[in-house]
Amino acid sequence: MNERARLRARRTDIEEKRVKVYEPHLRASDPGLFEDHEKWDFTRSRLADYRRVLVGLRRAVRDAAHEPVHIRETMAAPPLVSRSDRRNRMLRNIAVAASRSAFGHLAPKPAPLEPAQSKSQRKIDLFS
């Protein structure tokens, strides 16, 4: 990576100080008010130093393609936008589930259900 950065800096230096001075015919746009907005076609340059730097850059890029690349990408967490009533309901559900699993063995066992009675067998006591 160091070699590529050095060659890129050298390429930029040659483009600015030598190619633009010695090969003005490579300017692709008319000279305007601002030099930063001029367009140049550096691919047609005949300067030997510039060509040597380009060959070195191609070689460095090719060699780097065979090296293992370690990419570490981090992403920001998405914004947690929710209504407070939904957050409270979710927290309540979590608390209930946690308390059931932690203290469920301490709860009294429910009473057994009585068998269902038919309507004729039910006693209705209206006067008590």
Image (cartoon, rainbow, N blue to C red):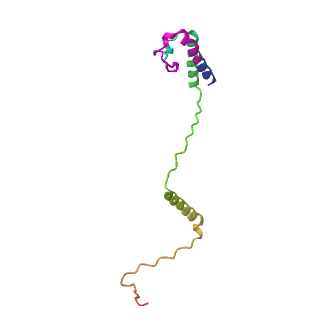
Q: Residue furthest front?
A: 33
Magenta residues, start to end? 11-37
Q: Which residue appears at 36% of the width and 82% of the height?
A: 119
Tell me which secondary structure the magenta stretch mostly adopts: helix
**Quadrant where the image shows the C terminus:** bottom left
Tell me if 85 is positioned left or right of 118 in this view.
right
Residue 121: where, in percent of width, then height? 38, 85
Residue 11 in the image, given as x and y percentages of width and height: 58, 17
Residue 36 inside the magenta-drawn segment: yes
Q: Is residue 14 above or below residue 64?
A: above
In the figure, residue 97 lies in which quadrant? bottom right
- Taking depth in this image into account, of 107 and 95 the one nearest to the observer is 95
Q: Quadrant of the N terminus?
A: top right
Residue 23 among those drawn in magenta: yes
Q: Quadrant location of residue 127? A: bottom left
Tally the numbered discs.
Answer: 0
Q: Nearer the viewer, residue 68 or 127?
A: 127
Where residue 109 appears, x then y in whole percent?
Answer: 54, 73
- Point out the residue furthest to the right here: 2
**Looking at the image, residue 119 lies above or below residue 85:** below
Q: Is residue 84 left or right of residue 124?
A: right
Tell me the quarter of the picture where residue 124 sits: bottom left
- Of 8 and 35, the residue lying toward us: 35
